[in-house]
Image: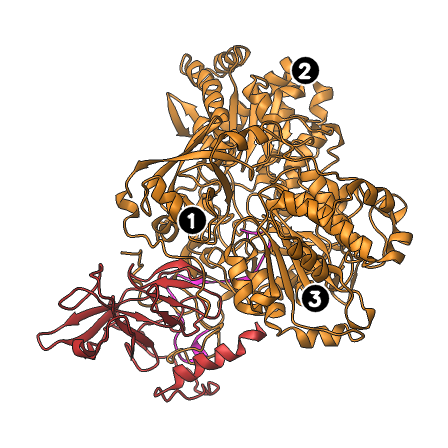
Amino acid sequence: MASCEKLVDMGRRQFLRGAGIGVASAATATVVAQPAQAAPGQALVNYPANRLGNVSDLILNEPLDVSYPDDSAPGVLIKLGTKVEGGAGPDGDIVGFSTICPHKGFPMSFDANDKTLNCPGHYSRFDCEKGGQQVWGHATQNLPQYILRVDDKGDIYAEGLDELLYGRLSNVL
Amino acid sequence: MAFKRHIDRLPIIPAGAKEQIVTCHFCIVGCGYHAYSWPVNKQGGTDPSENVFGVDLSVQQDADTSNWYAPSMYNIVKQDGKDVHLVIKPDPGCEVNSGLGSIRGARMAELSYSKARLTQQQRLTDPMVWRYGQMQPTSWDDALDLVARVTAAVIDDQGEDGLFVSAFDHGGAGGGYENTWGTGKLYFGAMKVKNIRIHNRPAYNSEVHATRDMGIGELNNCYEDAELADTIFAVGTNSLETQTNYFLNHWVPNLRGSSMDKKQEQLQDEPHAPGRIVIVDPRRTVTVNAAEVEAGKDNVLHLAINSGTDLALFNALFTYVADQGWIDKDLIANSTTGFDEALAANRMTVEEAAEITGLATADIIKAAEWIAQPKEGDKRRRTMFAYEKGLIWGNDNYRTNAALAALALATGNVGQPGGGCVRMGGHQEGYVRPSDAHVGRPAAYVDQLLISGKGGVHHIWACDHYKTTLNAMEFKRVYKERTDKVKDAMLSVPYGDRDAMVAAIVAAIKDGGLFSVDVDIVPTKIGQAAHVWLPAATSGEMHLTSMNGERRMRLTDKYMDAPGQALPDCIIAARIANNLERVFRETGNDAYADQFKGFDWQTEEDAFMDGYHQNAGGGEFVTYERLRAMGTNGFQEPATGFEDGKIIGTKRLYSDGKFGGKDGKATFMATEWRGLQAEGKQAEKGKWPFLINNGRANHVWQSAYLDQEEELVQDRFPYPYIEMNPDDMTELGLSQGDLVEVYNDNGSTQAMAWPTPSARKKESFMLFGYPSGVQGNVVSAGVNEFIIPNYKQTWGAIRKISSIPGNAAHLSFKSQEYPQS
């Protein structure tokens, strides 16, 4: 859709912010045949445990911009005010989500009125109180949610994701 | 918690992976996709040289990238007997969807049959027969012999009228040109079967008889017209959910104003503005909301009419624009007949229409102005008229369809850029059959005949009456009774004694029983009653051709093996014909047996060449090889030639002012308003408190047969929902997610309550055709004069069955509308 160009640019700026991504150059390297050697692999990607903030940084029902598992994956932490399944912290009400729509990758915004993340591209909506369930929309997955841990000092760590992030074929690049 | 796959990475499509063309097989829009497959022991890499995209996949890809695919677009399937990786992703080069994937189409891979990843294990893999009291696998030869012997015995006894058929007539999955021809040649060529119906209605008829009778085919424009129109007039069509990428890729640019360049370039001699839209629908849909988001509320007119009063509105609009002189007088004079008579017969004032429809007179006049008031410089306003089930399955189908087409015709909007009077469609189309003239008009009301005990054998092709018919509860009750009679008889003899088995079945049929043969890809609800299941292949497991809502014909490549012994429907039809020929010859009826010659097809391409290539208008220009070269854009039917390696198509119909009626003219019809037309509807409305409006949802639309075993959808909608006004819910003591019973004199069904502030009081909306709650149970048997069902005008009562069930406790019941500032 030509009309989405602005949104594409918005998304691009957001992705580029702090990520230092260069334009991929044409491949020039020649693949040299190597002796067959099985490489060890792991069943899951290794997620970093990143400190995203402290409980004291959060204001009720106001999203705190974060990124996880790296700077090119924007997201939010939200203190919802009511305990939810998957919620972390002393009140069980802190959740974290990717804010990139899993349909076409546009950046979503939080609607404090009903605690949803909403995509301006094609109107998809995700419920932050229901594990990122798509209320209505085009994505074929519910919204990737952070697996959070809060330590004794109130520091909030993200330690994993439960769905594939838009725009990458491995959650950890 | 909401369902999560816990997939943190996917295999990368390697450079050199096999690329196959795919048209999404679910809805009418027919979005273009590519299926990539590669050996299961290989994978691509992040280096540009190692992946099919030629880009660095070690970095985050931008919004709207074509270099990404969701877990739902991936699977492991069999191809030529070997496991392969499969990715089916939207094609950015397809003009229909420009890389957009809907929540249905973007799950095609995940909705494929995979033993390795345990997806769609419900698929039928072998012919099954009722043997020793349960459905048991058997060989094709055994199953087809039983089908042929029982069918032949019934025909010998009752004639061809004893054979009842329910068969798809559309394109996409469960249809397509190959398969409509295969079944059509069997039932309309070899035989002249009269008691036949289509998948979603109880007779063999057009849903849009009227526009055809006027000489205007119902798919007459192109999707680009939605970008060029000054106004879109949308009737009973919730296009954001049911023609999703058509709406997003072609309506939205007009509403946003981003198609202005295209308007100015193609239509230079007139002023232009961003598009406006009129939406006629008793319900506020997400389509209304999205239109407001894009165009601004000032450019969206939602006419929330009283249910079933569309005809009064159209007659008033027709009268008003005619009286204002906002009509195409030259076209009416040169290319049409019956205008003056129709205007006299249909005359209705704005005030009369306001009284009937519940609209404000000012809004009716505003709609007329948006449709037809000349633009600056006295230029004709361009309006595209779009309609679907709100009209088609609504009150007085025939007249209402004709009245809308008359408005489009009179205002000069058929055959012109930015115009058209088109149904939005459900499935794709894919119809090529021998003449159906012997069926007659009105066609036989097949469901009522079955309920009344008629027929001896029933062949079902990808239809599920238990889910998608009217009067469904009564139909199911009788159908089960009649087929149980045959099942019990089959238990009385050893299966291996074929003569005794056929004799027992025939005796049960004479006693009111019914022998049921169900051809499908999954076990259906009606299949529970059947005696034979024949496993069919679906799109992508066979080559399949169809056309979309702008008559765009494409080939979907066969990209994977069909499950087990499953075969394309056209080949199953041919094998039934082969077996009937054999059985009739064995019984000495050579003359009749000869009618079943001509079914020696080995592949679906044989059926295509026998059917479409030889019988469709322009079919002589179309072959698989030529279609494959046309890729996901195909061509728009009808084909008119083949030049420079390309099939030449037709962008719009009737662009020369020549219509499909007598002498190339279109005909206006008298379509007087007559209230709720179908028998019993007015009384039903008077008796019951709630309108039980019904329709479709974005998550599940033309995909329910697969979604019934798909976790994303089942997790979201374990039950059909019913949108209700919150005050109504309070009065009934209901909380969100509570299971309610919807009931009236026709039957009863269940749904979960979704509080919806935009729902008008006493006007509910229930998801249609859902496996765990069938709305058709409460729809009366009332039809129009041509046996078109009236699902939409249904009234009933609602009561609580249970508090929110455990499998719904995690669900969100927030508003479906995108928030507007």
Q: Which chain is orange?
A: B
Quadrant where the image shows the C terminus of chain B: bottom left
Q: Is residue B212 left or right of residue A75?
A: right
Residue located beneath label 3 in the image: B230
Which dot, 3 or 2, sits closer to the camera? 3
Snapshot quadrant of residue B635: bottom right
Q: Separation of disc 3 and disc 1 at Cα?
A: 45 Å
Residue plotted at (56% across, 28% down): B683
What colouring method underlies this structural image? Answer: by chain
Whether B529 is drawn above or below B522: the answer is above
What amino acid is found at the position of numbered circle 1 in the picture? Tyr
In the rendered image, residue B648, in percent from the top left (x then y), is placed at: 76, 61
What amino acid is found at the position of numbered circle 3 in the picture? Asp
Residue located beneath label 1 in the image: B113
Q: Is disc 2 placed on a helix, strand or loop?
A: loop
**Label 2 neighbour load within 10 Å: few <14, some 14-19, many 20+:** few
